Amino acid sequence: MLEDKQWSWVLLITSSTTLICCALPILLVSMSLGAVSAAMFANFPFLTILAHYKIWLFAGSGVMMVAAGWALFRPNRTCPADSAKAKACAQAHRWNTRIFSVSLGIWLIGFAAAYLALPLLTLYDNFIC
């Protein structure tokens, strides 16, 4: 089983892949930088693979988010009785909570860009016209 510190870094990496594959290209195209997005996909072919399997990418990273959230905030989580170790444990938990929050934010931005942006834009266009 992964320790708290290892969970936080795994989460940060997996949630960042959702941002890179889905949110960044949409942001670039929205800012009229489609050529930059095309050059990025041409120079980094793994981005095409990530975008092609984005359902599995989001599902896998979502499951990891839930597992890491449980590992960080599980009931009966305790720190050692030794004061030095307890202080280090509390500090590590604070940092892991921060990294988890950043990872969750990145995941939510990627999810919104990949799955919610187009339906909301279509709904907006239908409402206005």
Image (cartoon, helix red, strand yellow):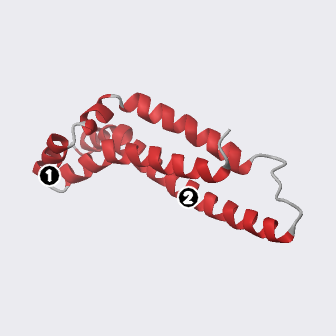
Instruction: Examine the image and state in which quarter residue 86 appears.
Output: bottom right
Where 117 sits versus 95, above or below? above
Q: Residue beneath label 1, please?
A: 36
- Point out the image quarter for the N terminus: top right
Q: Position of residue 51 (x, y in %)?
A: 30, 34
Instruction: Examine the image and state in which quarter residue 5 appears.
Output: bottom right
Q: Where is residue 66 in the image (x, y as percent from the top left)?
A: 61, 40
Q: Could you say whether the residue bearing mark 1 is in a helix, strand or loop?
A: helix
Q: Residues within 10 Å of mark 1 (few under 14, many from 20)?
A: few
Q: Would residue 109 be found to the left or right of residue 1 on screen?
A: left
Q: Would residue 97 be found to the left or right of residue 117 on screen?
A: right
Q: Position of residue 59 (x, y in %)?
A: 48, 31
Q: Do the residues labelled 2 and 1 touch (CB within 8 Å)?
A: no
Tell me which residue sits at (21%, 53%) in the image: 28
Can the viewer see residue 120 in this picture? no
Q: Position of residue 20 (x, y in %)?
A: 33, 47
Q: Could you say whether the residue bearing mark 2 is in a helix, strand or loop?
A: helix
Q: Residue beneath label 2, please?
A: 99
Please name whichever residue, 91 or 110, is drawn nearer the observer in this view of the structure: 91
